[in-house]
Image (cartoon, grey):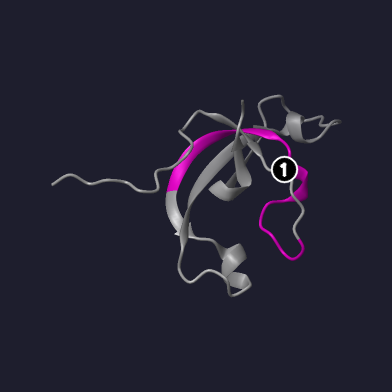
């Protein structure tokens, strides 16, 4: 049997992507300090129901790809004094990620 994926993941592990810089009204799960930053996809976590849409009653069970991404702390905070090896790992839905051209 051949399986056809109609909604394949857009990003691969190790790929650099940008977190969207959007500011919708309401509560959203991507911290403002992460928006607009370049991150690296560490892991594809599969498809999950988007809690942002679920919270507003808009979802109806639709699933989005969910990724663990990583960024160096020094790239987040201008005056970061910790180790250059310190990182933040955080989970982000695909609708918040953009390819880097």
Residue 30 drawn at (x, y percent): 68, 52
| Residue 67, position as x, y percentages in the image | 51, 45
Residue projecting furthest to the bottom: 57
From the image, tell me which residue sits under label 1: 34
Q: Is residue 83 left or right of residue 1?
A: right
The furthest residue to the right:
79
Reply yes or no: does residue 43 show up in magenta: yes
Q: Residue at x 45, y 42 (%)?
A: 44
State whether residue 43 appears in this view: yes
Say whether residue 12 is magenta. no
Vertically, is 13 above or below 54?
above
Q: How many marks?
A: 1
Q: Quadrant of the C terminus?
A: top right
Farthest residue to the left: give it. Answer: 1
- Residue 59 in percent (x, y) is at 53, 69
Q: Is residue 37 left or right of residue 100?
A: right
Residue drawn at (35%, 48%) of the image: 6
Q: What's the residue at 48%, 36% (across, down)?
A: 11
Foreground of the two, 80 or 33? 33
- Magenta-highlighted residues: 25-45
């Amino acid at each position: 049997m051949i399986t056809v994926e109609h909604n394949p993941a857009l990003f691969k592990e190790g790929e650099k992507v940008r977190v969207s810089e959007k500011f919708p009204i309401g509560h959203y799960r991507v911290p403002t300090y992460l928006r607009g930053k370049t991150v690296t996809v560490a892991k594809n976590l599969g498809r999950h129901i988007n809690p942002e849409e679920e919270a507003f009653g808009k979802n109806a069970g639709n699933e989005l790809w969910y990724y663990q991404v990583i960024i160096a702390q020094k790239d987040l905070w201008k005056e970061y004094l910790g180790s250059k090896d310190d990182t933040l790992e955080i989970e982000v839905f695909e609708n918040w990620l953009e390819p880097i051209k």
